[in-house]
């Protein structure tokens, strides 16, 4: 019987050790895994809440975003609880594949960028993908999709003085001029005409109606960092986007034959007006016809947004897109930075590196929750050195007893109690026999 008790006690101790959390309090916090090169494996320990420009773009440098009299600046867009596109899309700084052999180009200075496969939706690499920035004329890609969805390309639009009076880059629309939607769409995307953007917005039902359609489309695509404040991309109150969002928009746009044709066209004939004759409109994208397999793209600039760029190229069966936001001309113009990133992306694809995220196909409500989730907004809680023992997962705490530690403890306790009762009864029986034998002898 003592041997049985010893065995049962041993079982209890083993079961206690197997119980999840029993040893967690004595175990140190998890450490970041190390790669074979000795570099820390990228993780999602840093949430987008800790990134700069978490909920809004940097402060403007001019008065372009001041609301009109009687109006107020809209509040920042809500930040999703989970980063759209996967956990790593919530990281700050460079987001690159673990163990990738291809070196990052050194002259890329844009504040935020994303490299993505247009066919699969895989995000190949990125930098601050959900940092909120201003799009400048890249928002015209969103307007272009709205136009294609809502207007017939052969519809005629009559130019107005309001079109001609638009600020910034203009293609040359004049009062009384007659233009097809197709001609305006091509001028919008090839030459970034703000007058074409205004004329198309009016054709869509007015500027406010056009903006409502643009923002509704952004939400439909899952571009939750994006709010168009103007149809052209000129800075306005509440204007916001991200490199990730514009990658979603660009991918959706390139699925439309009309859009893909427009950004790849080098020159078109454009109607004149009044006494002004027709003229040529040229594409202002510097990589068109120069970068191998270039499919087209869009350029942008405002004082607050700084230089912005998006473009795509096809090589070895892959259609790779790049979006860059808040860049400068020095030391390297954004088209050059884009070409370096495209080269980098194609090299990563060639070595079959694992993607770091995904371009979603629709709003995130219909998307599965990213595995692991977004870390807490509290830096102390998100720091692995401060991880509470209760956050350790069951998989990490399992022993040979699996998940059965608690039931084993209960079972062993019952067994010990039963054995103790049986032992006491046995001892009493022995004592009774001894008493009877003593009485008989006497």
Image (cartoon, rainbow, N blue to C red):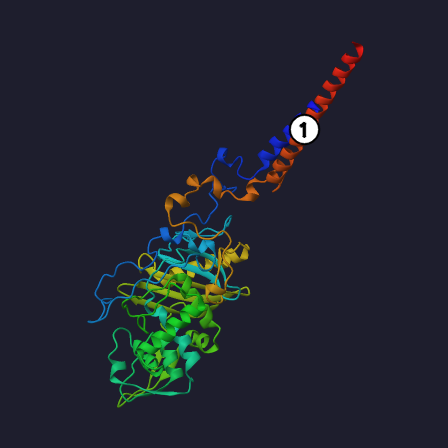
Of residue 156 and residue 401, the one placed in the foreground of this image is 401
Image quarter of residue 305: bottom left
Graded by Cα atoms within 10 Å as few (under 14), some (14 to 19) or many (20 or more), the crowding at tag 1 reads few
Q: Is residue 125 visible?
A: yes
Q: Is residue 407 left or right of residue 176?
A: right
In the picture shown, does residue 370 fall above or below 261? above
Q: Which residue carries the number 1 mark?
A: 421
Please state which of residues 432 and 311 is positioned toward the viewer in this rendering.
432
Is residue 141 at all visible to an observer of this figure? no
Residue sitting at the far top: 442
Residue 431 rendering spot, x and y as whole percentages: 72, 18
Along the viewing direction, whichever of 82 and 155 lies nearer the viewer: 82
Location of the C terminus by quadrant is: top right
Pinpoint residue 183: horizontal percent, then vertical percent. 38, 83
Residue 403 picture location, percent across and down = 60, 42
Q: Give x and y (percent) for residue 17.
A: 58, 34
The image quadrant where one finds the N terminus is top right
The residue shown at (36%, 70%) is 139
């Amino acid at each position: 019987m003592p041997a049985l008790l010893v065995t049962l006690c041993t079982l209890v101790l083993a079961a206690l050790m197997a119980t999840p959390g029993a040893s967690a309090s004595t175990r140190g916090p998890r450490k970041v895994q190390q790669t074979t090169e000795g570099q820390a494996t990228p993780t999602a320990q840093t949430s987008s809440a800790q990134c700069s420009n978490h909920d809004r773009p940097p402060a403007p440098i001019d008065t372009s975003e001041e609301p009109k009299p009687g109006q107020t600046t809209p509040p920042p867009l809500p930040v999703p609880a989970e980063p759209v596109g996967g956990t790593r899309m919530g990281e700050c700084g460079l987001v690159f594949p673990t163990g990738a052999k291809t070196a990052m180009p050194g002259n890329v200075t844009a504040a935020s960028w994303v490299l993505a496969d247009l066919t699969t939706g895989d995000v190949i690499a990125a930098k601050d993908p959900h940092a909120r920035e201003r799009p400048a004329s890249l928002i015209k890609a969103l307007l272009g999709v709205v136009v294609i969805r809502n207007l017939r390309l052969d519809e005629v639009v009559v130019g107005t003085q309001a079109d001609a009076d638009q600020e910034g880059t203009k293609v040359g629309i004049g009062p009384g001029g007659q233009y097809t939607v197709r001609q305006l769409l091509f001028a919008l995307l090839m030459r970034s005409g703000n007058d074409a953007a205004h004329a198309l917005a009016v054709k869509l039902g007015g500027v406010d109606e056009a903006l409502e359609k643009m923002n509704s489309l952004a939400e439909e695509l899952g571009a939750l960092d994006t709010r168009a404040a103007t149809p052209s991309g000129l800075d306005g109150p509440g204007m916001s986007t991200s490199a990730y969002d514009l990658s979603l928009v660009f991918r959706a746009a390139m699925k439309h034959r009309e859009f893909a044709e427009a950004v790849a066209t080098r020159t078109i004939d454009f109607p004149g007006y009044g006494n002004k004759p027709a003229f040529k409109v040229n594409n202002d994208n510097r990589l068109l016809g120069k970068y191998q397999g270039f499919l087209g793209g869009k350029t942008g600039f405002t004082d607050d947004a700084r230089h912005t760029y998006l473009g795509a190229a096809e090589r070895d069966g892959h259609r790779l897109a790049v979006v860059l936001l808040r860049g400068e001309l020095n030391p390297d113009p954004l088209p050059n930075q884009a070409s370096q990133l495209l080269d980098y992306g194609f090299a990563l694809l060639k070595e079959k590196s694992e993607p770091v995220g995904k371009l979603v196909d629709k709003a995130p409500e219909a998307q599965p929750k990213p595995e692991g989730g977004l870390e807490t907004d509290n830096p102390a809680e998100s720091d692995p050195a401060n991880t509470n023992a209760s956050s350790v997962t069951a998989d990490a705490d399992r022993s040979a007893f699996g998940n059965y530690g608690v039931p084993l403890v209960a079972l062993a306790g019952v067994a010990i109690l039963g054995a103790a009762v049986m032992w006491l009864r046995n001892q009493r029986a022995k004592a009774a026999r001894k008493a009877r034998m003593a009485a008989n002898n006497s």
